[in-house]
Image (spheres, rainbow, N blue to C red):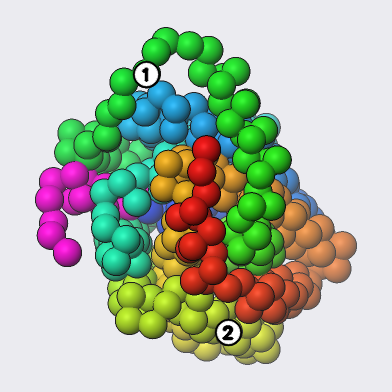
Amino acid sequence: MKYNRSLLGWMLYDFANSAFTTIIVTVVYSVYFIKTVVGGDPGYGEMLWGRAIGISMTLVALTAPIFGAVADFSRGKKRMLFLNCYLTVIFTALLYFIQPGAIFLGMLFFIIANYGFNSANVFYDAFLPEISKPEDIGKVSGMGWALGYVGGLFSLLVALVLVKVNVRLVFPAVALHFFLFSLFTFFWLKELQRPSKRSNYFRIAWQRVSFSLRNIARLPQLLRYLISYFVYNDGITTVIVFASVYGNQRFGMSTTQMITYFILAQFTSILGAALFGWLTDRLNVKVSLSISLLIWIAVVIWAFFCGSAREYYYVGLVAGLAIGSSQANSRTMLSMLTPVNRQAEFFGFYTLTGRLSSIIGPIIYGWIAHKTGDIRFSILSLILFFILGFIALQGVRLEEGKAQALNMKE
């Protein structure tokens, strides 16, 4: 595999955007919103946070297929990536102004930022088969995730300093991190250009999406994989959204302690993304992804029975290994099962599947926490997503699916 500026530019976007997932969604803003902005009865903040996640993911689910098709037809992936990236940057910076009690604005600004973040990933992911060779996709995807976790680690170290001064300073710092390091992507990443006539892109996009809906039966292995992904991704998303909240609520871990917790987890996340990317190229992506889902099942069971903050640190290390591997492998498997000339369009469906599933888990988690007042039952509910997702994945015939994607014609 040869590295070039375009490839490095693509990878550095993972480094840039990981600060948002790590700090805003997972570690700092989630706890700040639930404990400081909302407060009140146990479980109420979790319920509102789950709804904020659900609303933003619903909006992404509604627009991602259309945007993906527009990008694929117009060769506008980079432009759409730019617009959604900086939508996230702006509204992440605005979180600085969210004070205790500002529940509506706290939810609104986060919903817009999270929408931009996830929409941008449609176009970012669609570059993967364009900037790498088929035999290197697993390695490139894994290295991108690994570099992303390095970016997450860097942002955590900065947050560890700022949170001791004023926790709200962390939010514009994340926006600055995202802005600065995404510049490498927009200067270096090259998009393959194809001449196209001016047209009504949204009309053509709808035609292409309709075509995909009518003909997805021609890609039965891709369909099977998307069903599996729909289920297990719900568990992954919910863990990301509530991991810090779980440590804070169950074990009384402070924001500083949770930042330290995730700093340690970043190292195993980096290892997981790189190691399982290598395993994908050495064996195959299905085997690699299956192993990571088994690790997730073990993590959920351990978190339920976990009895102390110290033990929860060990749970986090294992969870880091699982999240690094499963996310990288999910992106790789989708790329392998997708026709090369419809990458952006089918990555839109991939995002649609992921975001639709991401609506269910956080809402259920928050609802259980609010109704029972015990978040241990919330975390235990996630095991069902991983078990069913693992079972569905075993029905995917990888080589047959790759042949179906290769042979699919317009």
- Secondary structure beneath label 2: helix
Which x, y percent locates residue 238? 63, 62
Snapshot quadrant of residue 185: top left
Residue plotted at (34% across, 51% down): 129
Q: Residue 16 colored magenta?
A: yes
Residue plotted at (59% across, 36% down): 65
Q: Which residues are magenta?
A: 1-17
Residue plotted at (72% across, 75% down): 388
> Is residue 399 rendered to the left or right of residue 349?
left
| Crowding at mark 2 (Cα within 10 Å: few <14, some 14-19, many 20+) | some
Question: Is residue 84 in sight in this rendering?
Answer: no
The residue nearer to you, when weighing 59 against 238, is 59
- Residue that numbered label 2 is attached to: 294
Quadrant (top left, top right, bottom left, bottom right) of the N terminus: bottom left
- Mark pair 2, 1: CA separation: 46 Å
Snapshot quadrant of residue 190: top left
Which x, y percent locates residue 207? 62, 26
The three-letter amino acid code for the residue at tag 1 is Ser
Overall secondary structure of the magenta stretch? Answer: helix
Q: Residue 218 colored magenta?
A: no
| Badge 2 vs badge 1, beta-carbon distance below 8 Å | no
- Residue that numbered label 1 is attached to: 196
